[in-house]
Image: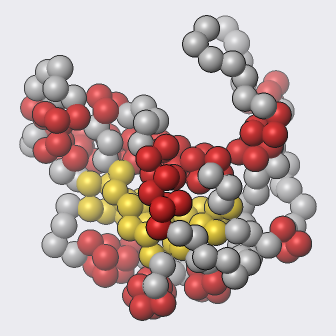
Amino acid sequence: MTGGILTEQAVKQIFTEARTHSNWLNEPVSDDLLKRVYDMAKFGPTSANCSPLRIVFVKTKAAKERLKPALMEGNVAKTMAAPVTAILAFDMKFYDHMPMLFPQTDAKSWFVGNDPLIFETALRNSSLQGAYFIIAARACGLDCGPMSGFDKGKLDQEFFKGTSFRANFLCNLGYGDKNKLHPRNPRFKFEDICQIV
């Protein structure tokens, strides 16, 4: 065994008492804290260490205004109020970095010219990295509000035009107003959806 079980407090902070927030306190999030979140999340595993996640941290009022037209109506107010909105995207040319990221073999050759494999790998692994990002943010004391209610075409055009990046999902970050949380929604029990065979 290489490690032990986290403290109960850590488990509460990251999982059992963590909530998705839509209302935010007027408290800033420092650039140093965002860097710390990424520097934790980057160690989560991806296929052949392909690491396709790319992140744009939208903090300034001007940047939020650029993001606003791509948001679905129900996501506008909470996103404008959040101290930071992370655009979690993936790089469709992630494989160009494989010689550095996975030098054990010529992994780049697995992907060149295979668009379906490129997309599937980029989407799956950036989604995994997005989940690691949420866990890291919570571990650093931030609250998260992940969401997918946006016009992907508009967002890609505004933030990623002329690049190989494509948006996956958004995640508001900051310090949530716990007084405005609704009761937690139900989750499945182990025996409802799991099997040990």
Q: Residue at x 44, y 57 (%)?
A: 35
Q: Can see residue 131? A: no
Residue 182 vs residue 149, the one in the foreground = 182
- Place of residue 147 in the rendered image (x, y in percent of width and height, measured from the top left): 58, 65
- In the depicted structure, whether residue 36 falls above or below residue 11: below
Say which residue appears at 42% left-offset and 32% top-offset. Answer: 45
Q: Is residue 151 left or right of residue 29?
A: left
Number of callouts in the render? Answer: 0
Task: Residue 4: give x, y in percent of width and height.
Answer: 69, 18
- Residue in the image at 75% along x and 39% along y: 10
Query: Depth check: 8 or 118 in front?
Result: 8
Q: Give the image quarter of residue 195.
A: top right
- Location of residue 58 (image quadrant): bottom left
Residue 32: give x, y in percent of width and height. Answer: 48, 62
Image x and y of residue 197, in percent: 67, 8
Residue found 60% across the figure and 67% down from its top: 173
